[in-house]
Image: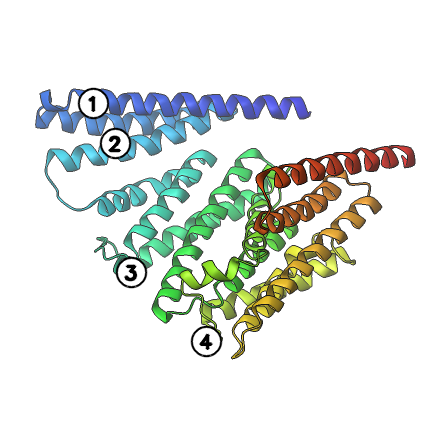
Amino acid sequence: MKKKGETQASSIALSLVGFVLVGLGIISILAYNWAELGHLERTVLAVGLLVGSQAFAFWVKHSKAYNQSLLEGSGVLWFLMVGASLAIIGQTYHLGGTLSDFLGGWLLLSFLGVWVLPSFSAAFLHILLWTVVWVSHHEKFGEMINTTMQLFMPPWVLFVVAFSSLAYYMVQLRKAHDANGTLFLSWAIALSFMSVFFIELAIETYELRHLGHITTFLALFFALYYVIGRLYLSHGEKMWQRPFVLIGKVGIFILLFCHLSFRSSHWMDTIGYTTEEVFFMSDLMIGLGMVFVLLLVLFVRQCKSVPSEVLIILSPFIFFIYNTLIQREEALVYEAIVFINISLVLGALIMIMRGAKESCMGMINQGMLLIAIAIWIHFMDADFSLVAKGLAFIATGVFFLAMNALVRRKLKAHS
């Protein structure tokens, strides 16, 4: 059964690559011969590409509905030809407008195809296109980077399209939760939400001139991703099949590593991470916090024990305490960095102990790797020669390999 699923996934992937190449090839040929085409030829081509791709997609849906590769490929081809046709018409009749207008028109003309076919691949591309349109048309973001970005359609239209995509995603979660197509949609949703959050966070911190608790925002967001991924949005045991868990975990680890060094206070000063700011609970943080607490309660009820990756779950509280320490009138920067180092070591030890208890080699290695990276970070801060640092790396690597082999032998003996 597993081999059959892998074969189908490979077939769909190859089909998608083929249809994307066909679509890009058609666009390239048109671009090369663009100057030789008159208004009539261009109009006929635009209508022909649009109608032809739609006719092909409907034929596949009614005659080859069992062929998932063709169905997905036809959806991608339709999506690409909508954009190509729109670009041809706009260039031919000099309709004017900006790139944002073109992308917005493409978004409106293609979102119904996601439901009509339906096509996971077209939905994936449509979600990514929505993200680009939303970011490019955000008025406050444009002001922040000194760029005028306007779109011909009102913001509520973008929200309607977004809700349509989310509704499609929820339907697919119920119908085929562990399908590869649903997994790809989860990746698209995860990347889209992360982009929207980063833009909103940048705008909020820019307007308030308040950077002191930006790490608490980020930790809250990544921890929320991790918890919701563990609860609902995982599509298999492999890490690439758990996009929300993977993004949340990587994000938290990067935040922790950036604050382990005793020199981290220097780069915090360079970005305006001052110790004189007063904590401000914005609507964004309050909303994220409420959702996180709700999901955390559900997560604890499901686990019924201390989770092995408790470090990730508690990271918002860790960074809240860390920021509180460094933003006091008498900043306790040294104590704050010691606190975050102790938190990481304790979290890593819990991973190692739970991994040994559950015979999970991956969790043991993850905990040991966190401790090893923490040691390397502090060793690189020290004023030792490159030879000494190189010998320390070798010693740490040998110790890591030896412990790995020892744990494997013990686990094999118990099993």
Residue 175, percent from left and from top:
58, 41
Q: How many marks?
A: 4
Is residue 67 visible from the viewing direction of this image?
no
Pair 3/4: label in front: 4
Residue picked out by circle 2: 84
Mark closer to the chain start, 3 or 1: 1
Residue picked out by circle 1: 30
The three-letter code of the residue at mark 3 reads Met
Name the residue furthest bottom. 329
Mark 2 Cα shell of 10 Å, populated few (<14), some (14-19), many (≥20): many
- Mark 3 to mark 4: distance in Å? 24 Å
Query: Which disc, if any, is residue 144?
Result: 3
- Mark 4 to mark 2: distance in Å? 53 Å
Asked if the residue under mark 1 is in contact with the one under mark 2, i.e. CB atoms within 8 Å, the reply is: yes
At horizontal 50% and vertical 47% (from top left) the residue drawn is: 190
Residue picked out by circle 4: 276
Pair 2/3: label in front: 3
Mark closer to the chain start, 3 or 4: 3
Against 312, residue 102 (above or below) is above
